[in-house]
Image (cartoon, rainbow, N blue to C red):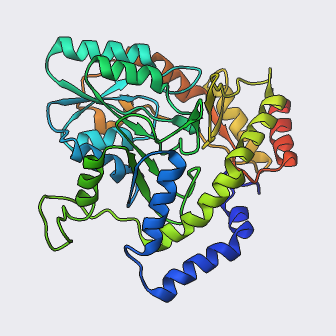
Amino acid sequence: MMEFRDLKTQYQTYKQEIDAAIQKVVTETNFIGGNEVKELEQQLADYVGVKHCISCANGTEAMTLVMMSWGIKKGDAVFIPDFTFFSTGEIVSFLGATPVFVDVDRETFNIDTIKLEEAIIKTIEEGKLTPKVIIPVDLFGLPANYPEIERIAKKYDLLVLEDGAQGFGGNINGKRACSFGDAATTSFFPAKPLGCYGDGGAIFTNDDKLAELLTSLKVHGKGENKYDNVRIGVNSRLDTIQAAVLQVKLKAFIDHEVEDVNRVYSLYNERLNGIVETPFIPDGFYSSFAQYTIKLKGNEQRDGLQAKLKEYDIPSMVYYVKPMHKQDAFTYLDINDQDFEITNKLCDTVLSLPMHPYLSEEEVDKVCDVIKEFN
């Protein structure tokens, strides 16, 4: 059966290096805070092009740590896209603040900057919440429209936290994802563009004081050492084995994987042009293609195509079946469903196809042939 994201082939390709990296950690028994963690943080910072990379336990906690360091609390408004994974909104409510969902751009799937500014103005005029942060999401590997988002943030004196969980490896005119805003986060969940063999995450920033505070917060609010606790923190560390795996995979990621997923993107687009609506990448933008997501005409056609692909043992996924504003956990918010026309439509029409650096041209042909036959 075809793999949706082929971690098996990736492992076989780099088995010798990965096994050796893991064995070195096991032999040295330095499972927490080993040299590999610091080395990886430096390599990640250098790749992204920022001063600091602070690793942590996962992408969700990466965002939580940044929000904690900024003192986000009850009464604060945080603006996030409606079409994304639950954790982006969850971390806002977790700290007592209020997520304000914003509809997305139909073409890019990312936060609609016109609607974002409208939501900020509306929140200010209502006077119930204090606008504090924008969390754009680099959905499916494509960086959000940061030039415009940063302009809006400056205008209204807001902080920007880039959720680069899916965006690592993408760029805008050469400026890499996870280098935008006041801070950025990513996830090393196995299926992400750069994934480890468990959970993992990281925070990126050029702010020295923020980096120092984050380093404390992630280890029980430590001061000089972990037994000198100067603030209330959490326990959120990337373990050494995961860092060792990521060092091997980061080299592959830089050497060829991002380029290879863009090759697959081109193959898909050539074959599906005029058949279905293919992903749109704006001029100057470069995606790391966490997903290759097409749009169908409606729910019935989408579900029918997914069933047809399954008949041929071709996996596909729907990201996302339910928008943020319809999640049961957010029923306490005052939400008007009509404000999310695009997101509601996307949830009924999107379908993600197999996408990874090891996908062959023959496999792309097989997927596209089934789609053409279905249409």
Answer with the quarter of the image where residue 238 lies.
bottom left
Which picture quadrant has residue 370?
A: top right
Residue 19 coordinates in the image, percent (x, y): 63, 78
Identify the residue shown where x is 53% and y is 33%.
143
Q: Residue 245 location in percent, x, y? A: 56, 68
Decide if residue 190 is in sight here. Answer: yes
Image spot of residue 1 (x, y percent) = 77, 57
At x 50% / y 54%, what residue is drawn?
A: 44
From the viewer's perspective, tell me whether residue 155 is left or right of residue 171. Answer: left
Q: Residue furthest bottom?
A: 27
Rendered position, 250 above or below 323: below
- Residue drawn at x 51%, y 88% as measured from the top left: 27
Q: In this rendered view, identify the residue nearer to me: 335 or 365.
A: 365
User: Is 216 situated left or right of 174 in this image?
Assistant: left
For the question of whether residue 188 can be seen, the reply is no
Q: Residue at x 44, y 74 (%)?
A: 35
For the C terminus, the quadrant is: top right
- The answer to whether residue 159 is left or right of residue 85 is left
Task: Examine the rendered structure and indicate whether residue 277 appears above or below residue 143.
Answer: above
Q: Position of residue 324 (x, y in %)?
A: 39, 33
Corner quadrant of residue 277 = top right
Please count the marks in the image.
0
